[in-house]
Amino acid sequence: MPLGAKPLRAWGARFYNDTSGETFSVKFLSAIDRYIFRLVLMPMLGIFLLAASLLVLDKMLRLFDFVATEGGPIGVVFKMLANLLPEYASLAIPLGLMLGILLAFRKLATSSELDVMRAVGLSYTRLLRVPYMLAILLAALNFAIVGYLQPLSRYYYEELNYELKSGALGASIKVGEFNALKDRIALRVDESRDNGRRLIGIFARVVDKKGQVLAISARQGQFLALKGAPDTIILRLDQGQIIQDIPGKEPRVLSFTRHDLPIELPQIEKFRKRGGSDREYLLPELAHLGWDKDLPKEERISSQANFNYRMVEVIMMLLLPLLAVALAIPPKRSTSALGLFVSIVMVVAYHKVNQYAADVASLGKMNPILGLWGPFFVFAALILWMYWRVAYVPGGQAIGWLEKGAEIVVKRLKSLMKRTKRGPILPEPAEAS
């Protein structure tokens, strides 16, 4: 047995016949299906986690820098990343599905197990039963993500971004820099201790509505909150001086042991309602807006472009098992991994074409249906042709010409490397006459 010493068993349901008293079972997952499922599952999960982690780490570095610049709490970084996970998942799920199937069938092909399965009468279409179960399940999951979860998470991300910039999340005082508070107070702190509870080396410049200027310096201080006035905080200063400059009068210098400086916090406007951009609308809302004749044409076209973009991205997942199998089978007596590289390039290029078409269509320069479904049908026709070449043409290869070209290039590179290692060939010395 090529799959191990254990006999082949199947997952199924057992039924009882009331007339004859006999039992019979319906098999829907054989041992080969379970074997293919195990081969697909682990690479698929690994690639999904790897792709999502790389996207999150890249964004995390930029968010840490952004939050530090705005002076917000570090914890908001992880909240913003959590709201970006649905967007990253919608990209990582198709990639993980395709590469999981591709690596599974590549392993079957290079270990000659695929030849055994084909010899006993199992076609490629039969072997794709489990991969298509996974594809349909993940396509439904991705539909829920891009149609419902992703718009909501994008809105919450923009809300956190707004609150961070407006100071609603609690902006901090930057040490060693002048901080403007409500355009009338400039504050500088030399040193912060005890997590900001104790401030050392304070300078403040306060301008009131009458034009009076107060220049205050203090050895130390701290911020205090007022229970009855949440929009006002108290900066309690210890051991300092105040230079009072009143227009038309001589400046006065006052020394103090303790002085309370009230600071009014700016009013923070509430964030807008959901729907500031097409990405924040749920899929049914986009469908309603896109074909609502009462709306302006520009708004309808933009909604139609985003709606069709989401739909083609989800439906495209149903073609990925065929593409994976077409590119997974290397030529005989070859272990070339060119199909892996080509599959990534094709999926990423198709995704970028869809993004470009959606952007152009939203501007009204292209018909949304033609601009997004046109590339989809071209991509689908190419995939079906590649799968037909592998599955129904004896000895057929989807990218056979590319494999031969790559083989010629590799051979020439190897020959050049060998010549370089040997060094230049010197002419033989001439014999003396």
Image: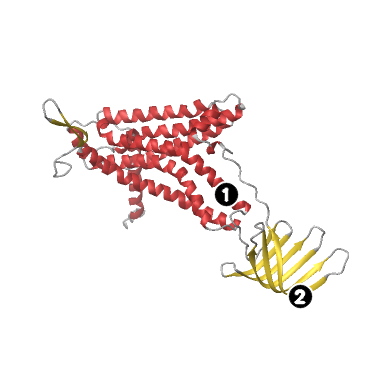
* Residue located 60% across and 48% down the image: 162
Residue 222: image x %, image y %?
Answer: 64, 68
The residue that appears at 44% across and 31% down in the rendered structure is: 312
The quadrant holding residue 19 is top left
In the picture, measured across the screen, residue 240 lies left or right of residue 110, that is right
Q: Is residue 73 visible?
A: yes
Residue behind mark 2: 255
Q: Label 2 sits on what residue type?
A: Ser
Can residue 109 be seen from the camera position used here?
no
Q: Quadrant of the C terminus?
A: bottom left
Label 1: which secondary element:
helix
196 lies left or right of 214: left
Label 2 element class: strand
For label 1, the residue is 161
Looking at the picture, tell me which residue is in the foreground, 89 or 168: 168
The answer to whether residue 336 is above or below residue 379 is below
* Lower sequence index among marks 2 and 1: 1
Q: Position of residue 304 (x, y in %)?
A: 53, 29
